[in-house]
Image (tube, grey):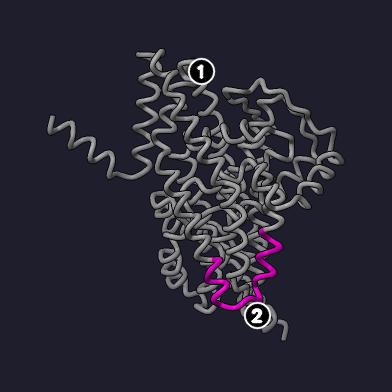
Amino acid sequence: MNQSSSLLKRIASGSLVMQIMVGLAVGVLLALVMPEWATSLSILGDLFVSGLKAVAPVLVLVLVMSAIANQSLNSEGRIRPILVLYLIGTFCAALVAVVLSFLFPTELALVSSEVSTTPPGGIGEVLRTLLFKVVDNPVNALLNGNFIGLLAWALGLGFALRGASESSKKLVADLADGVSLLVKIVIRFAPLGICGLVANTVATTGVDALLGYSQLLAILLGAMLTVALVVNPLLVSLKTGQNPYPLVFTCLRESGVTAFFTRSSAANIPVNMELCRKLKLHEDTYSVSIPLGATINMAGAAITITVLTLAAVHTLGIEVDIATALLLSLVASVSACGASGVAGGSLLLIPMACSLFGVPNDIAMQVVAVGFIIGVVQDSAETALNSSTDVLFTAAIEKGGVAEVAKEKEFA
């Protein structure tokens, strides 16, 4: 008895990753051994999904507004080109995710995948829907989960508050911290919610449902590896004119590995600062670019949002043309910049991208729950890509600037 209680205490006080793995294993075991009990556990999954639906709209509004209002985009030094490279890298990551999702379309086993939807007629209808969602009333957007409208209001209020007093900005930042705390509380119940979701899914659809999740995870990891080892080196090479891989592998080894286990770009900021010092970069540059990158340089988040959104679209049989896919890449890039710093924060922005295709919010939140199931690996890899790229792009701009100065002296 003492040994079992000690084991339970270790699990309860352990990391969220370990708890999710235990919940996943328990859910599968219950579904295989006692399927009638497993279906009754669906209430745990329903409560978890409902909790996510409750906090996600408020999170998008407050977090993005606070980030813009309090972020000082100092144009001195080389901050502006680093910012541009952050945005280009994030958009390229979303494009890679779109290509892989089209090459390897994935359908998910969802509880309500038979819900009737009206697919958009094309890019014109998507743009029309997007414009009307942008000008939605903010209260109505909160009530109906209109993430596009919430993002528009967050951007507008954020820029408007940049000229506010420091006390007002601090109030907005404190509000964002409070909402983030509520998100952390909801996510702490992820092991129970995932246990209920997995148990009900396996008991209802069989183990084959998990095979779809493994394919989804493979696409996510494949896209992240492609960005880390192909796209990012290409961008660095174009900027520096040198072999990028020594710098790429240094950033992955000394920043990416740590971020993989901490699963937090914000927690990895001190590691990135130390790496920048080792690389002998200018402190007045990386002291701004590294915290800025932890907020808006979200290539991994863009991949997650894009792949899971297209998985929902393929599951519902909605046709996607090239123009709409490009629009999704842009929306995923912008929304990824507002991803929460907590574990699984990018997953809560999936409904906003899904709304482009008329995917019901209930279906979108089930996809979010699937993301939490595979998040043990996905979120770690996403954070490793995001955080290591902060240093990589900062160093690329620094080295590119040095190379340009050297060329100017040579011609002089």
Crowding at dot 1, Cα within 10 Å, few <14 / some 14-19 / many 20+, comes out as few
Q: Residue at x 37, y 34 (%)?
A: 21
274, 8: nearer the viewer: 8
Residue lying farthest to the left in this orientation: 2
Residue lying farthest to the bottom in this orientation: 412
Residue 47 left/right relative to 101: left
Give the quarter of the image for residue 107.
Answer: top right
In magenta, the rendered stretch is 154-172
Distance CA(mark 1)–CA(mark 2): 58 Å
- x, y percentage for residue 343? 46, 48
Disc 1 residue type (three-letter): Asp
Q: Residue at x 54, y 73 (%)?
A: 288
* Residue 208 - label: 1
Disc 2 residue type (three-letter): Val
Q: Looking at the image, how many numbered discs can be counted on the residues?
A: 2
145 drawn magenta: no
Q: Is residue 91 visible?
A: no
Residue on which the image places disc 2: 405
73 is higher (above) or lower (below) than 109: below
Q: Are marks 1 and 2 in contact (CB under 8 Å)?
A: no
